[in-house]
Amino acid sequence: MRTRVKICGITREQDALAAIAAGADAIGLVFYPPSPRHVTREQAEAITRRLPPFVSVVGLFVNADAQTIAASCQAGRVSLIQFHGQECADYCAQHGRPWIKAIRMKEGVDPVAAAADYPAAAALLLDAYRPGVPGGTGDTFDWGRIPATLADRIVLAGGLTPNNVAEAVRTVRPYGVDVSGGVEAEPGIKDGDRIAQFMRGVHVGQD
């Protein structure tokens, strides 16, 4: 099965279009104000207005209230919600869209148990753990902690770059991979060449 790719932390329309032109399946918009990749609703609307069909827009939220989620999703044409905080399964399911739950792989966290805690999630996004930081750390974690039986429900994140994504795909065989800082010129500004290199790495890892 082909590994899907999400380019997250998009803040500019041209970066969204570059990601799609390189073959990405989805872009991610960060609706979390403390993040350097945060976008407003107005920015989200501008970024997504020219996207071609069959491209998923993922809205990332961290412990946001329902009104914020609804308004942001409408403005950004969000088709899938990514919950990156301490949201419970019942709350994640209340917003009328498919959703994925980010799990930070702190020592002792069992991804199989996490999957059981969020049975209605379209996928689990497994990310590196750093205290006090909900995501986007640029850190990796031990991919060997992911059982093969769970791979088709996993979006792998955390420190992925053009240099290591092929190994990550070969090791985990995840449903998808998620990259942000690994394809940037600076926080929030994507590098088209690095996106293209990342996509090539994904394809190499599947061979």
Image (spheres, rainbow, N blue to C red):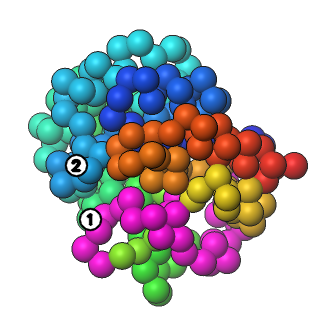
Report the magenta residues as a range.
131-159
Dot 1 crowding, Cα within 10 Å, few <14, some 14–19, many 20+: few
Q: Type of residue at label 2?
A: Tyr
Q: Give the mark, 2 or 1, whose residue is nearer the N terminus.
A: 2
| SS for callout 2 | loop
Which residue is identified by label 1?
A: 86
Give me the residue at 12% from left, 37% from top. 67
Which quadrant does the N terminus fall into? top right
Residue 135 image point, x, y percent: 36, 61
Q: Nearer the viewer, residue 28 or 91?
A: 28
As drawn, 189 above or below 103: above
Q: Which mark is residue 32?
A: 2
Residue at far bottom of view = 108
Residue 146 image point, x, y percent: 63, 72
As drawn, 204 above or below 115: above
What whole-number distance in Å separates the C-alpha atoms at marks 2 and 1?
14 Å
Give me the residue at 30% from left, 46% from top. 37
2 and 1 marks in contact (CB < 8 Å): no
Residue 59 quadrant: top left
30 on left or right of 140: left
Dot 2 crowding, Cα within 10 Å, few <14, some 14–19, many 20+: some
Tell me, yes or no, whether the highlighted magenta stretch contains residue 6. no
Tell me, yes or no, whether the highlighted magenta stretch contains residue 147. yes
Give me the residue at 59% from left, 43% from top. 194
